[in-house]
Image (cartoon, rainbow, N blue to C red):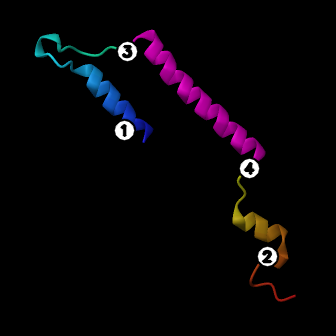
Amino acid sequence: MWFERFVIIVTSLHRAFLPSQWGMFFPTIVDILTFVGTCGIFMFLFLLFLKFLPAFAMSEIKNVTPQASPHDHH
């Protein structure tokens, strides 16, 4: 969804309404830093998520807790 909005904005900036004003869009430093900042905040939040809510493989959980295994008959 984010990429779709990005494509809509970039293509709308690429072509103006008047054909005499058509030209190539070149991002400014603000555009580049906004993009880098959004990637950075995503990676930061993703790493926080992995730190506080780590993903565990179900096979490891079943090896540690035998009562969770449906094949355990004890």
Mark 3 vs mark 1: which is more N-terminal? 1
Query: Vertically, is 29 above or below 4?
Result: above
Question: Does 31 sit left or right of 74 as displayed?
Answer: left
Q: Which residue is mark 1?
A: 4
Secondary element under disc 4, as helix, strand or loop, is loop
Residue 20's tag is none
Q: Which residue corresponds to mark 4?
A: 54
In three-dimensional space, the C-alpha distance between marks 1 and 2, rounded to whole angstroms, equals 43 Å
Element marked by disc 2: helix
Q: Count residues near mark 1 (Cα–Cα under 10 Å), then give few for <14, some for 14-19, many for 20+.
A: few
Tags 1 and 2 in contact by the CB under 8 Å rule? no
The residue under label 3 is which amino acid type? Pro
From the image, tell me which residue sits under label 2. 68
User: Considering the numbered disc 3 on the image, is that residue within a helix, a strand or a loop?
Assistant: loop
* Residue type, numbered disc 1: Glu
Measuring from the top left, give residue 45's x and y in whole percent.
66, 36
Q: Badges 2 and 4: C-beta atoms under 8 Å apart?
A: no
The image quadrant of residue 61 is bottom right
Q: Is residue 69 left or right of residue 7?
A: right
Rendered location of residue 37, percent (x, y): 56, 22
Q: Amino acid at mark 4?
A: Pro
